[in-house]
């Protein structure tokens, strides 16, 4: 199993990465940067208004965002791990965040079927 966060095509095929992690029991695969988000959108496995992005920060509370569409993320207000309120451009947020990495939850489960 890979020990690092997927960062883009240089790390191999993203579908193979997702299947490998799923097969090995990892609940939420992790990524860095915007390229993986774009790849997930191109695979049509991101479910707008269902899929969540969680940014992991080294020294502050993590943040959750709902995927609104292929360009926008909306901060989720929760008791723990709230995102920043409002809409954010996905490319800008994921490219410039100080988060160490991000996870995705709520992908279309058909990605794991061959």
Image (cartoon, grey):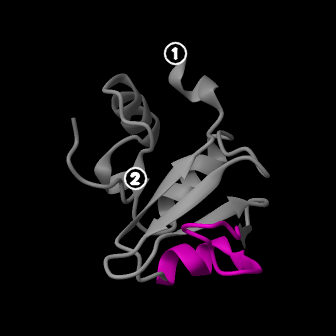
Q: Which residue is drawn at 70% across and 70% down?
A: 77
**Residue 7 appears in which quarter of the rendering?**
bottom left
Of 111 and 57, nearer the camera is 57
| Residue 99 in picture, x, y percent from top left | 41, 76
Q: Give yes or no for residue 95 being in the magenta stretch.
A: yes
On the rendered image, what quadrant is the N terminus found in? top left
Q: Report the side of 14 relative to 42 (left or right).
A: left
Residue bounds of the magenta highlight: 76-96
**Does 75 appear above or below 114?**
below
Identify residue for label 2. Answer: 30
Q: Give yes or no for residue 92 being in the magenta stretch.
A: yes
**Does 69 appear above or below 85?**
above
**Residue 100 appears in which quarter of the rendering?**
bottom left
Q: Report the side of 41 relative to 61 (left or right).
A: right
| Residue 80 in picture, x, y percent from top left | 56, 67
Count of numbered labels shown in the rendering: 2
**Residue at the farthest top position:** 114
The Cα atoms of the two marked residues, 2 and 1, are separated by: 21 Å
**Residue at the farthest front position:** 79
Q: Residue at x 34, y 29 (%)?
A: 20
Per the rendering, the mark at residue 82 is none
Q: Which residue is drawn at 53% across and 51% down?
A: 104
Per the rendering, the mark at residue 114 is 1
| Residue 45 in picture, x, y percent from top left | 65, 39
Of 25 and 17, nearer the camera is 25
Counting residues from the start of the chain, the first of labels 2 and 1 encountered is 2
- Badge 1 local density, few (<14 within 10 Å), some, or many (20+)? few
Q: Residue at x 33, y 44 (%)?
A: 12
- Badge 2 local density, few (<14 within 10 Å), some, or many (20+)? many
| Residue 41 in picture, x, y percent from top left | 65, 50
SS label for mark 1:
loop
């Amino acid at each position: 199993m890979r020990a690092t966060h997927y960062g883009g095509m240089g790390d191999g095929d993203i579908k193979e990465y997702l299947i490998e992690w799923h097969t090995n029991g990892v609940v939420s695969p992790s990524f860095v940067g915007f390229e993986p988000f774009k790849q997930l959108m191109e695979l049509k496995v991101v479910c707008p208004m269902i899929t969540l992005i969680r940014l992991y920060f080294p020294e502050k509370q993590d943040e959750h965002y709902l995927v609104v569409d292929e360009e926008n993320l909306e901060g989720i207000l929760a008791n723990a791990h709230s995102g920043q309120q409002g809409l954010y451009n996905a490319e800008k947020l994921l490219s410039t965040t100080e988060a160490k990495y991000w996870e995705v939850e709520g992908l279309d489960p058909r990605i794991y079927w061959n």
